[in-house]
Image (tube, rainbow, N blue to C red):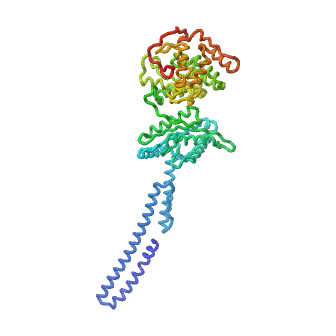
Amino acid sequence: MLRLIRALGFMAPVPVVLLAMVGLSVAVVADAHQRFTFSALTILAGAAGATVVALGCWIYFGLRLSQVAAALEASLTSEQPVRLRVAGTPAERRLARAFNAASGAFVQVGARAAHDRLTGIVNRETLLTTLASEIERATRHHKWLSVAFIDIDRFKPINDTYGHHTGDAVLREIATLIRDNIRGSDLFGRYGGEEFMLILPETTPEEATVLAEHLRQLVMDHPLTIAPRQAIQVTISTGIAGDVGSQLQADRLVDQADAAMYAAKSLGRNRTYRYRAVDDNAPVRRAPISAERRAAATAIGQWASDTAAEALASVLAPQPHHGGQPSDLIATLATGMALQMGLPQDEIERIRIASLLHDLGKLAVPLEILDKRGALSDHEWQAIGEHPRIGQVILEQASSLREAVPTVLHHHEHFNGSGYPHGLRGKEIPLGARIVAVADAYHAMVHDRPYRNARDHAHALAELRANAGTQFDPEVVNAFCEVFADGVPPDGLQEVYNLHERARGGLRRIEAPAAATGPTNGNGKGKAPGAKPAATPVEPAETAAG
């Protein structure tokens, strides 16, 4: 069209010259009236021609500019580059080529801003923006929305052993594997490091758990190739959180999913854990530890990383029993029950170490709270309730003691789910933690506390039996009562040594002379039979009566 108009423009002088020649010839023979009429017609013809050319140009350029504007608007939302047809005059072709290059560059910049460069999936900013939009939509239509946090287990050893190049390859393979096996409505992205987020619209937490379990099994069954003829097995831990309608809040949903993922890792990794709402009316609230106490625990753990169990036990030794002092009696009781239950020797050793260090977290709890005789405030109960988590942080910093983490973290969980810090129930609680819980409760009952006097052996056994199935695992309580029906060994390293000899097959049975001497108080002295307990509060989850 523009070429035709341009041709007409170039041809415009020709008719003008012809008209001029005709006009001259007519002027010679025509009168004045005829000359005026001819001049007027000539002017009108020229004006009409110019108008037609101008109108054609206006129509053409209007259509062309509309096409460019529409393409530019489409490029704002399109995930693929928008292309203009390269045609027309040299200027038009140049404009089309420049637009196409800019469109491609614009898409690349947008993709880089929205996607993680290493894995190719969406990045944290895009995830959080999408999460906010999905929460708004779920709130408006009263729909369910769930979020899954996925973390690669033991990723740091992969980097340390095979190098960061291999670590990057593992991240890419895991990201691709999960991205290709989720629903079209879901959004999967990299939240940071080896941690990923999966947004699941219109999905309940129960449905999200099923999907997450499918992905976990898929990753576990899919060896990752890191070099020719070399593959490694990788597992993931997943935390699930979700809510419906107006109950949804972005920050809370992210925190809950992250806490659930952290719980899955603390329970042994390679599992899916669904967040459970906290009961604010429960006697002990399950909440994350405070920043200042986490900092204190991390500092202790970093110091302990080069020392292992002996150094930690020496730090605990000067503390009172209720302040975390390691007890050979608890180690003896826990080891005896583990033996009775036929556990492997390495598991028995882990339980023994964990039983010595199970109250390690009380090092970061102020002594005035531990020694307080009166009722504790909510803030003080919060400090007490944090000590299993603090112990976890300490042991995680000491790499040689990490196997004891599940036992230390969960030794205050109750069999019926009313304990802390995660409210686990039944077989969800690690076996080592269930064993240490019974040993710890017995030890607490037969020793003096600031808030009550010690109880005798028979009373302690009766309390354990009474709380079997609620606070304690009935199977563990039965094992304890069978092994220590007549009494328990005294505190002392010799009894622990004897138990190890028995585990190796060197001894046939355990001696329990404490039945004749009776239980001891915190100073190792005999406690008078029938002593009346003090009328002060009992610490929940430490004694069976609590």
Residue furthest toward the right?
A: 506
- Residue depicted at x 39% and y 81%: 16
320 displayed left or right of 349: left
Q: Position of residue 203 (x, y in %)?
A: 49, 43
On the image, which quarter does residue 244 sit in? top left
Residue 429: percent from left, percent from top: 56, 29
In the foreground, 53 or 534: 534
Q: Is residue 193 visible?
A: no
Q: Residue 173 vs residue 26: left or right? A: right
| Residue ranking furthest to the bottom | 29
Query: Within the image, what quadrant is residue 462 found in?
Result: top right
Where's residue 50, x and y in %? 38, 75
Residue 526 placement: quadrant = top right
Of 545 and 101, nearer the camera is: 545
- The mark total stands at 0
> In the displayed structure, would residue 488 be above or below residue 425?
above
- Please name the residue shown 63% across and 26% down the image: 347
- Residue 491 pos. (x, y %): 59, 14
